[in-house]
Image: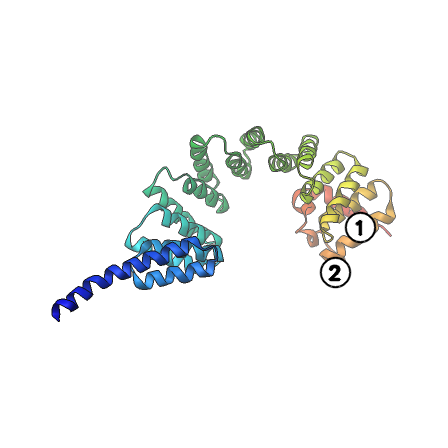
Amino acid sequence: MKKNIILILLVFPIISFSQANKLLRQGLKTTDLKEKIELFTKAIALEPKKLDAYFYRAIAKNDLGDYHGAIVDYSKIIVTEPDADSYYNRGNSRYSLQDFEGAKNDYAKALELDNNFLDAHYSLACVKLDLGEFEDAIKDFTSFIKKVPYNSTAYTLRATAYKALENYRNAIQDFNTAVLIEPNADSYYNRGVFLMEINYYKEANSDFNNSLKLNKNNSYAYFHRGASNLFLGKFIDAISDFSTAIEFDSVDFDSYLGLAIAYNKTNDVVNAKLNFDRANAILVPGKTITSIEQYKNTYWFQNQYFYFNENMNQLIKLK
């Protein structure tokens, strides 16, 4: 009898382990996230030290939007057997929760364990950019670019960091490189927005033209091209672009303000006032305009303050 008990005790862990593996395989095959989590949970119940089940359950939880649950599962793995993938994925879950410091620490830890982990290197640079650690972000993007020299997005993001530091020379070089590597709608658009910020309106206008040739569904490109046309004195073209942008978004107050200014420039007082009133109905509904500060959330206030202030004074006087 004792021999039978010993045999049962020896065989049960083998059966349990085999059943846990079967559940793990089933979980990997199904595409239903909730079913995945249920199967991996059953596998863990049978085999509590089965770290693969924790890892895949964490991925499923993350994909389902349960970032806290994913972090708990990744943490269980890290406590038992730390590895670069678990740190990296936990960093992604923390990033989704906007825990940028936590994400930064996890990406850095992943790199400590695997210095050739390119995704971790890239993500670390990105989160430093989000945290406003621009100089460190540039260093990390530079290191990443040395290993992956033809990633246009990395150049665009490094350009963003350079721009934040007002290093416009290096910023434009990176935006140019991004366009050379991948001359798509986004790279032209991103460079165009930067050129607008440094008052290169003609060059920006050209970039928005190229961007819209490749993607006619970017309402932001229409708005920015409209703004560049406005600054270049092409008021009819500006009216056309702002009107198109509004077709995409009927509450685009920035485009209504752009229309008001452009119509006023063409001495069309009726349409200037009409669009100014539409913008105000969205921005300050039912309120009297007492200060330009009421427009602090607009593109015009934040990027073209003096131009906007001058034209606001004219628009307010319209009857």
The chosen color scheme is rainbow
Looking at the rendered image, the quarter that the N terminus falls into is bottom left
Picture coordinates of residue 226, whole percent (x, y): 74, 40
Residue type highlighted by circle 2? Pro
Question: Residue 197, image x and y in percent?
Answer: 64, 37
Q: Is residue 161 above or below residue 275?
A: above
Q: Earlier in the sequence, mark 1 or mark 2?
A: 1
What residue is drawn where x is 61% and y is 34%? 184
The kind of secondary structure element at disc 2 is loop
Residue 27, quarter of the rendered image: bottom left
Q: Is residue 304 above or below residue 48?
A: above
Residue at the extreme left: 2
Left or right: 55 with respect to 173?
left
**Residue that sits furthest to the bottom in the current view:** 1
Give x and y (percent) for residue 309.
Answer: 73, 45
* Residue at x-position 34% and y-position 41%: 114
Q: Is residue 256 left or right of residue 123?
A: right
Give the camera-side residue of 56 and 17. Answer: 17
* Residue picked out by circle 1: 275
Residue identified by numbered label 2: 285
Quadrant of the image occupied by residue 178: top right
Q: Which mark is residue 5?
A: none
| Label 1 SS | helix
